Image (spheres, coloured by chain):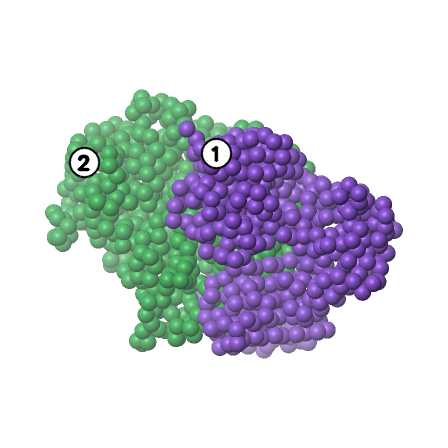
Chain colours: A purple, B green
């Protein structure tokens, strides 16, 4: 008799969990059902910007609705689970229907965090026409239908999501103002100086930025006419997009007496305190942390799939190192670990190239990299990520790591022609002495006259050094 | 009187350069008329003559009465009788599957065919495999899944010279197939570009236009990341995807997860380089992806190959002129060796032993009942792991392999987890080895048979292009040495089925063998020795004598029944052996230009050992400083399986988290001592290109 496994939620965490389960042949152990409150299959929410920019839902679809049936997964679309009775092992959905389960995984993710704003909602309790959340495919299509030049829009929130929405709206020709409560943009990923460089990139696109501002109300009776700030100022706007962060969706857990702090509290097995109920993704809180980026959530899905299927009963989730990398308005931003030092002994290195718009920073603890920021530079992030992930002891000169990457392209004198044992320095010498063609170089040094496999390298040397000489 | 030819092919790699023997047999020149190497040779090729009259050459069979005794010379009858007796005894006591044969990618097609026939008909054993399992089996698996056929390169090598962009994934072909570089030079002269993907800055990488210095084991993630960008930047060939392929939607959904942030973190390659690479790939009028062992020798080797075939298909490359996916096969007859029945799951003509139609066809051809043919046997490393009784390996109800015959392979150096391999070989009841020199494997054997070398016999090889060529006899063998075909016939005689092995020459075997392939995927039936001579080789498939052969595949259709190629959804996964705090570094292996595979031949050549007397461990200066390592020091590395010792070369050509050493040597400097037996689920390829290691000790002793 197969056990019933219920996955509550159908976002990216649920999709990944399904993949991990099937990778472990969970179909032979479980009858799996998925409860999703949207009508679509599972899609990649990170790429919502594409839909806002005019792409189709299919472009970001991870699992179309047919996927579930093909794998004998029962998919309840448009269904919100409202309560878990963990003793009778029954789920209740918003239509009042009950569903039996043996094991449940809550993957309800997060909801947009909506700041208290006077006049935001109409009489029906819904945001007034012109006010939008930025969270689902349907949000995107509604926004896209509404946003017609010469509209003007206020985007509330200058983090990842807000800036992405702002760029998409600006690309449609709208007048866009970003209102951000913190003193600089992307304050979760970068420090003040980094935020300043991001701001310059955003402003270059023609987007206006107001940092350190709190929006307090929506002006307009039946639709949005403007956004009021705490200063008393009003920004006229036809459209308000709320992208001011997210909060874990814990209402189901709360209604079901499952312990919740900021998120649903789970241990290293991703288990809640209630037997038979697990949680992964943006709704789960592990060791005091709620993760809002993809890699940690995948690691959670990996562990919970191991545990539930028995594929590796010893699997444990120990927390994740956080790494974010993205392009905001053409500016590369990478951020990992700490943004600022936390302990007195923490060491900080910063290199600012103000005019070029490049900023690099690292936080070092006990000779190990515990945090780094790169803005405006796409090259050095991967090697910094390696130091961060591996925790190797850094070399004495940390600037080497911060600025030059460390996979060097130059080397000591090496043998280029193995057949005749001709070294690079010998070849460069000959080129500088006037051997500026391959036949001349081979004649003078014998290089390339054996198996000939080094001739490509010889040509490169000639191109590099002959030019330098003639210049 | 034997008539000696003047032209033949090099004994070593899959490039199979044409060579000319001069009057003094030791002096070897490149054959200017063979259109693959056009007269060029590498240092291994032109020094290969030293092997022929080498003082260490075995010229008499060696036997010993127990493993404690030393070898003593014996005559051929005694040696062959002992092998046949052991095989007969083993079969009677433990059943037919307790005998096993282990072949090689160095054997001619004739030998491969006969070895497979010998295992299935004379021994009736399922257990036959070969060292090609260690070579390109992952590329074979990936090719079959994507295109329905496995010919390493679907185009002749000269197409490289015409391609606008070439992407080399895990191949250091400037060192491993040196004469191939002439085509890259031509390509460069034509204005083409080369991208090299390798954890090391190799000689190949140094001559490239773009080098992506990946973390070992991440080529799959890289390809998926590039496909993500191709989708984002709208660089797909949608018409091609619709008309010539199946399965794109599933792949698209999979790679939506491969955002550049993820790709960067896994591969260590920065987003700007990723974008540059994909732009070059999509803009080039012709573009080839060529993988080497660096991408393939992983426990996810087949999926890695398919990540690249996916990208190639998404860009519409396979079948387009000078474009598509290929693998640079390594061993001399790595291609032919994987087609004709020395692989556990295979019958001649690339038929599958578990396919009822294929079994029926071969059984009928051989004149035996189909049910008498054994089923699929164990893959190379699994076969080794099943040798001899031991508490660690004995699976209840599964009788182990007691007697092993090895032809042309040095298992001890070439297999993963050397300590375990040696223990398993020692646990056999009987071990026989046929080779020209004593090596690390034959040291353990009960009987060693001295055999002909490359220039001393006739036969055919299939090079890395799928071109079938002639090995010709250009030299006389020393007295006392015999050929592999001869040995198989003698053994078959002694086992009572000599009538099926009554061949007196390679040509006679070839004439049966080519008919055996008729109707198979790798159809050689229209190829004759004369046709090969007249055309400098014939490309398979060649199903009829008036058929010209097939230099280029896929122009109109792929080999799946509906003629379309397949996309395969594949995802990055961690290696079998992953670094942790105790074993923090990645260790990877590769080759020197001066040596070939397990070094049995090249370590005998003075000129080669003088140039490269032993392996050097590449250590990045940052890592060296951390452990107080200086160039020339002797460093002991340890993995979860064993220790190895290497002299150090401190160089920035390697990544700071990775160590590299070549695997051509045995003893304490055996790189494969460190490597684990983690196998690819499809190809059963061991994870040679990666092990988690730590630095145990550094000794400053002078070299």
Residue B671 placed where, x, y %? 35, 59
- Residue B595 visible, this angle: no
Q: Which disc number belongs to residue B90? A: 2
Residue A257 placed where, x, y %? 53, 44
Could you say whether the residue bearing mark 1 is in a helix, strand or loop? loop
Q: Nearer the viewer, residue B238 or B531?
A: B238
Residue at (18%, 47%) from the top-left corner? B446
Q: Are marks 1 and 2 on the same chain?
A: no
Residue B254 placed where, x, y %? 57, 43
Chain letter of the residue carrying label 1: A
Q: Nearer the viewer, mark 1 or mark 2?
A: 1
In the rendered image, the residue lying farthest to the right is A150
Chain letter of the residue carrying label 2: B
Q: Nearer the viewer, residue B307 or A459?
A: B307
Residue B137's quadrant in the figure? Answer: top left
Could you say whether the residue bearing mark 2 is in a helix, strand or loop? helix
- Relative horizontal placement of residue B112, taking residue B438 as reference (left or right): right
> How far apart, in angstroms, are the residues tagged by discs 1 and 2?
62 Å
- Relative horizontal placement of residue B220, taking residue A196 as reference (left or right): left
- Residue A349 visible, this angle: yes
As displayed, is residue B264 above or below residue B477? below
Q: Which disc number belongs to residue A88? A: 1
Residue at (43%, 40%) from the top-left corner? A309
């Amino acid at each position: 008799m197969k056990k019933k496994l219920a996955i509550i939620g159908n976002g990216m965490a649920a999709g990944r969990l399904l993949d991990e389960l099937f990778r472990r042949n969970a179909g032979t152990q479980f009858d799996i059902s998925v409860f999703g409150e949207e009508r679509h299959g599972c899609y990649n929410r990170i790429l919502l910007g594409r839909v806002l920019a005019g792409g189709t839902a299919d472009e970001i679809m991870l699992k179309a609705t047919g996927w579930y049936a093909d794998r004998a997964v029962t998919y309840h679309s448009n269904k919100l689970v409202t309560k878990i009775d963990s003793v009778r092992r029954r789920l209740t959905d918003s239509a009042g229907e009950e569903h039996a389960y043996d094991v449940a995984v809550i993957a309800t993710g997060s909801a947009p965090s909506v700041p208290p704003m006077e006049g935001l909602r109409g009489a029906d309790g819904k945001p007034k026409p012109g006010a939008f959340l930025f969270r689902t495919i349907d949000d995107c299509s509604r926004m896209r239908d509404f946003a017609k030049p010469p509209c003007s829009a206020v985007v509330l929130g200058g983090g990842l999501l807000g800036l992405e929405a702002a760029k998409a709206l600006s690309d449609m020709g709208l007048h866009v103002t970003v209102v951000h409560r913190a003193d600089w943009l992307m304050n979760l990923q970068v420090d003040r100086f980094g935020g300043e460089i991001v701001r310059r990139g955003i402003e270059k696109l023609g987007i206006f930025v107001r940092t350190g501002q709190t929006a307090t109300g929506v002006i307009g009776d039946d639709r949005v006419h403007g956004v009021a700030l705490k200063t008393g100022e009003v920004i006229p706007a036809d459209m308000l997009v709320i992208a001011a962060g997210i909060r874990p969706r814990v209402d189901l857990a709360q209604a079901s007496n499952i312990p919740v702090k900021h998120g649903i509290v789970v241990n290293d097995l991703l288990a809640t305190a209630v037997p038979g109920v697990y949680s992964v993704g943006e709704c789960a809180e592990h060791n005091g942390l709620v993760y809002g980026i993809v890699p940690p959530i995948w690691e959670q899905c990996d562990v919970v799939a191991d545990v539930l299927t028995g594929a590796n009963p010893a699997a444990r989730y120990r927390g994740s190192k956080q790494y974010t990398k993205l392009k905001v308005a053409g500016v590369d931003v990478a951020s990992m670990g700490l943004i600022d030092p936390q302990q007195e002994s923490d060491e900080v290195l910063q290199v600012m190239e103000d005019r070029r718009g490049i900023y690099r920073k690292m936080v070092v603890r006990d000779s190990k990299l515990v945090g780094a920021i790169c803005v405006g530079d796409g090259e050095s992030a991967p090697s910094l990520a390696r130091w961060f992930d591996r925790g190797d002891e850094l070399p004495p000169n940390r600037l080497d790591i911060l600025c030059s990457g460390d996979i060097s392209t130059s080397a000591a004198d090496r043998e280029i022609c193995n057949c005749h044992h001709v070294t690079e320095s010998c070849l460069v010498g000959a080129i500088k002495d006037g051997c500026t063609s391959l036949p001349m170089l081979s004649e003078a040094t014998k290089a390339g006259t054996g198996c000939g496999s080094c001739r490509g390298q010889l040509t490169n040397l000639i191109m590099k050094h002959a030019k330098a000489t003639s210049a | 009187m034997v008539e000696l030819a003047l032209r033949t092919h090099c004994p070593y790699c899959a490039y199979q350069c044409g060579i000319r023997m001069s009057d003094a047999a030791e002096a070897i020149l490149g054959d200017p008329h063979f259109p693959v190497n056009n007269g060029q040779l590498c240092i291994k090729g032109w020094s290969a003559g030293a092997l022929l009259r080498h003082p260490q050459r075995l010229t008499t069979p060696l036997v010993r009465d127990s493993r404690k005794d030393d070898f003593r010379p014996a005559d051929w009858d005694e040696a062959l009788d002992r092998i046949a007796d052991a095989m007969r005894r083993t079969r009677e006591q433990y059943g037919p599957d307790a005998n096993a044969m282990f072949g090689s990618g160095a054997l001619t097609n004739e030998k491969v065919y006969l070895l497979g026939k010998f295992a299935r008909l004379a021994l009736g054993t399922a257990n036959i495999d070969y060292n090609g399992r260690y070579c390109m089996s992952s590329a074979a698996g990936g090719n079959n899944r994507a295109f329905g056929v496995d010919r390493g390169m679907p185009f002749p090598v000269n197409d490289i010279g015409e391609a606008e962009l070439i992407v080399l994934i895990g191949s250091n072909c400037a060192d491993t197939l040196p004469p191939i570089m002439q085509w890259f030079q031509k390509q460069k002269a034509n204005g083409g570009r080369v991208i090299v993907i390798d954890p090391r800055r190799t000689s190949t990488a140094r001559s490239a236009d773009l080098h992506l210095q990946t973390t070992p084991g991440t080529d799959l993630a890289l390809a998926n990341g590039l496909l993500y960008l191709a989708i984002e930047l709208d660089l797909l060939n949608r018409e091609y995807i619709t008309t010539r392929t199946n399965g794109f939607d599933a792949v698209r959904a999979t790679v939506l997860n491969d955002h550049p942030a993820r790709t960067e973190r896994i591969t260590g390659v920065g987003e700007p380089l990723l974008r540059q690479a994909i732009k070059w790939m999509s803009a080039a009028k012709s573009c080839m992806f060529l993988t080497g062992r660096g991408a393939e020798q992983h426990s996810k080797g087949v999926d890695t190959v398919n990540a690249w075939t996916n990208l190639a298909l998404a860009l519409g490359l396979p079948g387009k002129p000078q474009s598509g996916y290929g693998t640079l096969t390594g061993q001399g007859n790595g291609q032919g060796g994987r087609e004709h029945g020395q692989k556990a799951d295979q019958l001649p003509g690339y038929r599958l032993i578990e396919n009822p139609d294929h079994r029926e066809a071969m059984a009928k051809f051989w004149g035996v009942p189909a049910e008498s043919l054994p089923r699929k046997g164990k893959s190379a490393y699994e076969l080794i792991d099943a040798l001899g009784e031991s508490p660690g390996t004995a699976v209840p109800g599964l009788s182990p392999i007691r007697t092993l015959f090895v032809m042309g392979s040095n298992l001890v150096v070439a297999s993963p987890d050397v300590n375990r391999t040696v223990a398993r070989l020692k646990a056999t009841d009987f071990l026989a080895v046929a080779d020209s020199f004593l090596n690390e494997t034959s040291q353990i054997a009960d009987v060693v048979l001295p055999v002909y070398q490359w220039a001393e016999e006739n036969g055919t090889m299939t090079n890395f292009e799928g071109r079938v060529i002639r090995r010709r006899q250009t030299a006389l063998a020393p007295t006392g040495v015999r050929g592999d075909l001869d040995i198989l016939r003698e053994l078959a005689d002694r086992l009572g089925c000599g009538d099926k092995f009554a061949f007196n020459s390679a040509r006679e075997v070839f004439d049966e063998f080519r008919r055996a392939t008729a109707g198979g995927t790798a159809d050689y039936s229209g190829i004759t020795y004369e046709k090969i001579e007249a055309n400098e080789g014939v490309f398979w498939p060649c199903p009829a004598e008036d058929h010209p052969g097939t230099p280029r595949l896929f122009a109109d259709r792929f080999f799946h029944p509906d003629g379309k190629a397949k996309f395969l959804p594949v995802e990055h996964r961690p290696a079998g052996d992953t670094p942790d705090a105790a074993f923090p570094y990645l260790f990877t292996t590769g080759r020197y230009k001066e040596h070939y595979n397990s070094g049995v031949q090249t370590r005998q050549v003075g000129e080669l050992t003088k140039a490269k007397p032993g392996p050097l461990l590449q250590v990045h200066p940052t890592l060296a400083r951390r452990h107080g390592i200086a160039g020339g020091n002797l460093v002991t590395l340890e993995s979860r399986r064993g220790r190895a010792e290497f002299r150090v070369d401190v160089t920035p050509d390697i990544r700071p988290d990775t160590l590299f050493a070549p695997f051509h040597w045995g003893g304490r400097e055996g790189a494969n001592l460190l490597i684990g037996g983690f196998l690819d689920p499809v190809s059963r390829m061991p994870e040679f290109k990666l092990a988690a290691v730590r630095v145990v000790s550094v000794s400053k002793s002078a070299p």
